[in-house]
Amino acid sequence: MTSLRAQKKRATAQGLADAAYALATLHGFESVTTDDIASNAGVSRRTFANYYANKHAAVVDGFIQHLGIPIVRRDDPVDPGALPETFDELVDSAQSFISGVFTEGSRSGHMQKFAKMVKENPGLEPYIHAVFLEFQNSQSHRILSERFGSVKVSLFIGAAIGTLGATLRLVLGPHAIHRDTPPLRGMAAAQGQSESQSAPTPLLTPEDITKILAHIDHAFTYLRHGFADQ
């Protein structure tokens, strides 16, 4: 059972992350300060510093929470019964989550907003990778590794994340490409890149969703075959 102190600490961290992401979405990442985040969350600047090194980490955590993924710290207790008992269950839960990102309107909107935010603020990228590295050192990852093997779990999670990233690029196209990415060749490519940066982020249509789900299903078919009996 999680202690009251641990629950309070988790609630404070969640509040800071939610405030950071909400403010960055509303006012723009560059316009938000750590003082703004602390004030919005109802805590002191010192308390913010106890939980986050900077606003980058807090904004990334806030985005992840809006996707429905709880932020798990390395030492957080984990109920083994809440984790997949078989590798097939792990694959199914990963596919269900990724599909849900695009079938639940609010999560899809957050993905599009955050992709644009990262494109405009590449400094956020290392903190996204840090979340995955933190998960690799978590109790959840340790339990899954004991059940299915550390190499198999790490490779599968990396492949699942890659599937999500590839799907985002399929959906957003040039909006998922960093603003500092050099043109492939010649001035024409550079001009096309500049025009794409100023265009609004595309909204997903029902036809887009159908294509996305087919792409995800296709990708996970390959993953299932690739990890079968490994």
Image: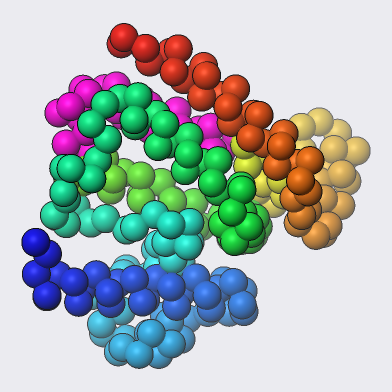
Q: Is residue 80 visible?
A: yes
Residue at image position (63%, 42%) is 168
Residue at image position (54%, 46%) is 100
Q: Main secondary structure of the magenta part?
A: helix
Q: Is residue 29 above or below residue 151?
A: below
Q: Is residue 33 above or below residue 66?
A: below
Judged from this view, the residue extending furthest toward the top is: 229
Q: Is residue 192 left or right of residue 42?
A: right
Magenta segment boundaries in residue numbering: 141-166
Provide residue 107's location: percent of width, then percent of height. Answer: 56, 57
Q: Is residue 4 left or right of residue 159?
A: left
Residue at image position (67%, 46%) is 176
Q: Is residue 137 above or below residue 46?
A: above
Identify the image quadrant of the C terminus.
top left
Q: Is residue 111 visible?
A: no
Identify the image quadrant of the N terminus.
bottom left
